[in-house]
Image (cartoon, rainbow, N blue to C red):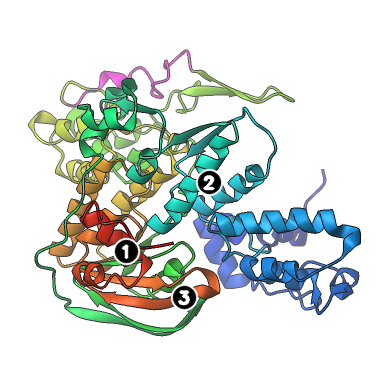
Amino acid sequence: MTFEGLIPKIQKSMLAKDVEAMQPHIRAFVERAVVFTNCPDCDGTRLNEGARSSRIGALNIADASAMQITDLAEWLRGLSEPSVAPLLAALQHTLDSFVEIGLGYLSLDRPAGTLSGGESQRVKMIRHLGSALTDVTYVFDEPSIGLHPHDIQRMNDLLLRLRDKGNTVLVVEHKPEIIAIADHVVDLGPGAGSTGGEICYEGSVTGLRESDTVTGRHLDDRATLKDEVRRATGHIEVRGATAHNVRDVDVDIPLGVLCVVTGVAGSGKSSLIHGSVSPRPGVVAIDQAAIRGSRRSNPATYTGLLDPIRKAFAKANGVKPALFSPNSEGACPTCKGAGVIYSDLGLMAGVATRCDDCEGRRFQAEVLEYRLGERNIGEVLAMSVATAEEFFREGPARIPAAHKILSRLRDVGLGYVRLGQPLTTLSGGERQRLKLAAQMADKAEVYVLDEPTTGLHLADVQNLLGMLDRLVDAGRSVIVIEHHQAVMAHADWIIDLGPGAGHGGGRVVFEGTPAELVEARSTLTGEHLAHYVAEGVEPAIG
């Protein structure tokens, strides 16, 4: 047999892989043992000497790619070369589309993996803005993710332009600002998960407001400014912060309150907080990174909920806890606890079929004979969070440790998710809220949340605010990076970054209470928040 040598093994498993994609224990070792630096010859541009020595004026292609797109578009306008005029025109149109869609602060050499979900989706949109095609159906799944209210206005203009070219534009969205421009609304419900899946309303936005659906009732909800805000018990001093477009920023972030950091997309919010606050001891940061887990992972395993449930089943039936794990002794021997059989069809896509022996329940038949409160472990994992919370609250199945975890899951708006649902079937917003619920169990003093309202319905935002309040009232400090006006209005303190994006941002343009921000109306955020809390006051913006 051929033996793979030690050096090829290390090169393939540690040096050739992205550190961020590694399993935690391997990543911890690699970060101790390996140092990654830019190539000394190309300085990280990945281009050979011939490409780097070719210039237009003083710039080579690496220099142009590293420029902020707004600057690159301006530089391109100064070029005059008849032989490549059509190429220049097409490139100019693409760069102008980046600026128009609110991504002018990016550079073309920015790694795609570092883009947020909202940025990635808007980059995909750019390909279609210049298309001459008509009678095309475009489907956008929450295009408002990561967008400030100011940026949502521009997004609306682009969606309407695509429609007016003769296309059909279908948008899956929660934000009332985007629902308001719809020609036709389809509202699904009445609840979530197993209580949803029905069309509750079809028609105009006006008709939706008059309907008695959950969306219709909450469409015009407006959070109000607090009469009294909490006072800070201390501060995190940030001095000389420099990361990306944040340059030498000094700011005091209050502790013991709900502090919201806001600003237009690309203004430097995440760079400031994740670069200067998140790495500090005692801080738990819940960012937008995806949860890494196999198709066997589910909300019960990820949050630690399965452990107290297994122990309770074992105690009630006098057997070992390992029997009640689909990844351990109780697993169906045919599907190995997966519930499905995966078939590799060679050149075609693989197929997953339900296991005939366990009928998708993942456990051996004898394990399903054991019960807790008249339910077996398969039936428990098939429960929704809301149902399970009632089941484990009282009676013979009362498990306080499980009920506590389930309450946090419900508070973040995941009451409809099934306990055994594979993580791979959850949306990005659902995964982030699951991560939020799991990390709320940590005994940290400071929580940093990055856009926790992503994917939340209007009716669920109030539940999230209630949970944040409970954290602060329990003596924790909560810092939220957020664009949602309801969260801004509910804050005790606001730090607004801007005034623009890219090198036009990166500065603190306001610090104070939401009421002071509304009264001053000195920033784009102030204008939009004033319009939000006093409906009918149009924001004086261009």
Q: Residue 527 carries which label?
A: 1
* Three-letter residue code for mark 1: Glu
> Quick one: label 1, few (<14), some, or many (20+) residues within 10 Å?
many
Number of labels in the image equals 3
Secondary element at tag 2: helix
- Label 2 to label 1, Cα distance in Å? 22 Å
Q: In which quarter of the image is the N terminus?
A: top right
Pick the front one: 192 or 89: 89
Percent of width and height locating residue 309: 25, 37
- Whether residue 480 appears in this view of the structure is no
Pick the front one: 166 or 433: 166
Taking the spot 37% from the left edge, 77% from the top edge, the residue there is 509
Percent of width and height locating residue 406: 23, 41
Percent of width and height locating residue 47: 82, 67
Q: Earlier in the sequence, mark 2 or mark 1?
A: 2
**Which segment did they paint magenta?**
355-372
Q: Are marks 3 and 1 in contact (CB under 8 Å)?
A: no
- Which residue is tagged 2? 158
User: Is residue 419 inside the magenta stretch?
Assistant: no
Relative placement, left or right, of 221 versus 36 is left
Quarter of the image holding residue 260?
Answer: bottom left
| Of the two numbered discs 2 and 3 in the rendering, the one whose residue sits closer to the viewer | 2
* Three-letter residue code for mark 3: Gly
Q: Which mark is residue 247?
A: none
Taking the spot 38% from the left edge, 55% from the top edge, the residue there is 149
* Three-letter residue code for mark 2: Leu
Q: In this view, does 530 lie above or below 250?
A: above
- Whether residue 286 appears in this view of the structure is yes
Q: Which of marks 2 and 3 is nearer the N terminus?
A: 2
| Of the two numbered discs 3 and 1 in the rendering, the one whose residue sits closer to the viewer | 1
